[in-house]
Amino acid sequence: MNEVSIRDILNSSEIVDKKVSISGWVRTFRANRFIALNDGSCLSNLQCVIDFENTDDEVLKGISTGAAIKVVGTLVSSQGTKQNVELKVDSCDILGDSEPETYPIQPKKHSFEFLRENAHLRTRTNTFGAVMRIRSNLSFAIHEYFKNNGFYYVHTPIITASDAEGAGQQFRVSTLDIKNPPIDENGSIDYKKDFFGKETNLTVSGQLEAEAYAMSMGKVYTFGPTFRAENSNTSRHLSEFWMIEPEVAFMDINGNMKLAENFLKYILSYIVNNNIEDLRFLENRLIDEEKQKPQNERSDLSLIEKLKFVIENNFKIITYTEAFEILRNCKPNKKKKFKYLIDKWGTDLQSEHERFLVEKEFKCPVIIYNYPAKIKSFYMRLNDDGKTVRAMDILFPGIGEIVGGSEREERLEVLLKKIKEVGIDEKELWWYTDLRKFGTAVHSGFGLGFERLVMFATGMSNIRDVIPFPRTPQNAEF
Ligand code: 4AD
Ligand code: MG
C-alpha cells in the first residue's frame, strides 16, 4: 500500500482512482460520515468519506476530534465544492483515540494566550501549522542562500567564557552547588572549582568566534540559539532565540548593507514561492483581525503585498545623524508625543522612534548606519570623525530592529583602547585581539533575529507565537 502525505496527494496530478493509505489526526467528524483529516504536511485537510453502515461501532466511536487514525481507501473526485478530491475509505484504524471532552483543541477559534498554554498541541491548529511550516522553510532558505553564495556554515559554541559582547545579561552555566559554593581566599565564589575552571555562560551571540572563522575561511555564517537574560517582557523579546550571523573577510560596511538586503529579499521570496497556501491563510486571518480595528489603524497592504513590497523595493539607507535630524524635527517629537524625546545627538533610538521612521516617514525597510560610538559595542569600526562607528541596524515595518551589525574594528591599537574603555580585561579576549595581530583585514557581519523575521513573514504580532516553545522571564514550560 502507498503510504502518502496529504501534501503529496494535493500536489500530484494523477491521483484519482489511486489506492492509498494515510495517517493523520481528525479535525472534525460530521454526520458519522465525513472525516476532515490533517497530517501536518500542509494546511489542507483531506476529506475522508466513511461508509458508516459497514463500519464497526467501536471504530466510529474512535473517530473523534484529536484522534490519530490511519485510513486506507481510494481517491475519487469530490462531489463537494470545497475540495477536488476526497478519499473513499475502505478501512479505518484508530491508532490513538482522543477524549473529546478534554481535548484542548476544539474545532473553534481559540485565543493565542490559550494556545500558548497548550503549546504542545497548538500546531494542530491551522495558524500554528502554517507559522511553523513557514519557519522551517525560512530556515532552509537561509542555508540555501549562503550555500549558493559561497559561505561556509560554522557551529560556534553555546557555552562561552567571554562575557565580551555586552549584549545584555547572560545565563550562568555552572555545576557548583548553589546552596554551598566553594569560596576563595577573597570570600568570592571560587569558579576555579567549577566545571570549566572559570565562569561560563550561555552565549548571547556567535559573532566573535565567527570572526575567527571569517579570518581564515573568508565567508562564513552561524545559525544557532542565543540566550539573553534581560528582563524585557515585550512582544519582540525572547530569552532564548535563534540568530543568523554571517561574517565576511575583506567586506566593508557598504558590502555588509548590500549583503543583508539581498539576503533578506532572497529568503522572503523563497516563502512567497513555496508557502503560498500558508501565507494566504495567514493573510485572511489578518484581514479578519484588522476588521476589528478602527479604519485609521488598518494596514494598507495585505501580508503578501507587504512581503512583495520588501522584495521589490530598495531599502532606505540613512546615517544616524540624518535619522536624528528627522526625528528631532518630526511632529510627535515637537508635540511631545514620544515617551523619550529626541533632543541631543548621541541618544539611543527607542522602538517608538524606529517605528516612526519605518512606518510613518519612509514606509519601507530602513538601514541606519554610522551610529554614535558611545551607544554601540566596542568591536565596531571607529570612523575618522572619532565619534561614530560603522554600525548598521535594519528596521522593518511592524517589527522595528530586525538586524544589527557592523564593520569590525580591525586595528589592534584602536581595539585595545576600546576594550580598556569598556572595562573588559584584554587578557580575556587574547584570541580575539590575536586576529588583529596576525593578518588583520577589513571585515564585517551582522545578526538577524530569526524570530523577528518569522514574525514579519507570517504577520504574527507576538514573538512567543513564532517559536515552538518560547522561553521568556518566568516561563519555561514544556
Ligand atoms: O543587535 P544584536 O544584539 O547584535 C548582535 O548580537 C551582534 N553580535 C550581531 C552580529 O553583528 N553578528 O542582535 C541581533 C538581532 C537583533 O537585531 C534582533 O533581531 C535579534 O537579534 N534580537 C532578539 N530577538 C529576540 N529576542 C531578543 N531578546 C533579541 N535580542 C536581539
Ligand atoms: Mg541591536
Image (cartoon, grey):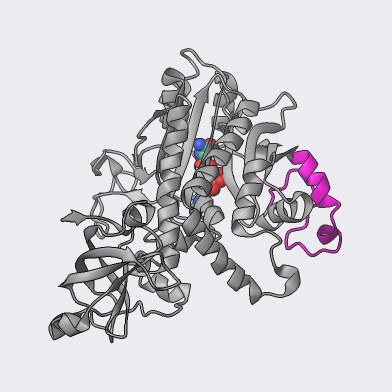
Residue at image location 74% in from the left, 73% down from the top: 295
Residue 220 in the image: x percent, y percent? 44, 28
Highlighted magenta segment, given as a residue range:
320-349
Quadrant holding the N terminus: bottom left
Going by the image, does 428 lie left or right of 300? left
428 inside magenta stretch? no
Going by the image, does 91 lie left or right of 347? left
Quarter of the rendering containing residue 103 = bottom left
Residue 464 in the image: x percent, y percent? 46, 62
Report the residue that reaches farthest toward the top: 439
Frontmost residue, 472 versus 395: 395
Residue 221 in the image: x percent, y percent? 44, 32
Residue at image location 18% in from the left, 85% down from the top: 53
Q: Can residue 328 be seen in this view?
A: yes
Q: Is residue 110 above or below residue 400?
A: below
Residue 164 in the image: x percent, y percent? 47, 37
Frontmost residue, 161 versus 288: 288
333 inside magenta stretch? yes
Quadrant holding the C terminus: bottom left
Quarter of the rendering containing residue 33 = bottom left
Q: Is residue 343 visible?
A: no
Frontmost residue, 189 versus 223: 223
Q: How many labels does the image show?
A: 0
Residue at image location 25% in from the left, 55% down from the top: 4
Quarter of the rendering containing residue 7 = bottom left
Q: Is residue 108 above or below residue 415?
A: below
Frontmost residue, 459 versus 477: 459
